[in-house]
Amino acid sequence: MTEELKYDRLWDEEIFLEDGPRTLRVQSTRDAYLLLRNYWNVGEGASRDKALAICKTVLSENASPDKAREAFITAARDAGIKVNSWTS
């Protein structure tokens, strides 16, 4: 395991991304980080870069994942991806 992925914790609530016929479940900061870094094919805007940086910080410092989840949701919505969860 690389140092940047040293820590991970599940989010309190997973989210579902809907992009056309595909639905993807994201349930942790590690999931979000890997998706943003390796598979984000909807542009590299400022909110994506911010979410990537926050996820990396959370993973390296064992910090609360709440800010990473919020930043990831913002990046997805800014990229035009529909975001769903059980409570919203």
Image (spheres, grey):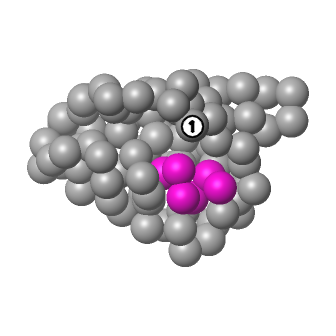
Q: Is residue 73 above or below residue 32?
A: below
Q: Quadrant of residue 1?
A: top left
Q: Nearer the viewer, residue 74 or 50?
A: 74
Q: Position of residue 78 (x, y in %)?
A: 66, 63
From this view, report whether residue 41 is shown above or below residue 2: below
Answer with left or right where residue 55 lies relative to residue 22: left
Observer-nearest of 71 and 39: 71
Three-letter amino acid code at disc 1? Answer: Ser
Magenta span dominant secondary structure: helix
Residue 56 shows in this picture: no
In the rendered image, residue 45, in percent from the top left (x then y), is placed at 62, 71
Looking at the rendered structure, the secondary structure element under dot 1 is loop
Mark 1 burial class by Cα count in 10 Å: few <14, some 14-19, many 20+: few
Which stretch is magenta? 72-77
* Side of 16 where 11 appears, left or right: left
Q: Please name the residue that numbered disc 1 is placed on.
A: 88
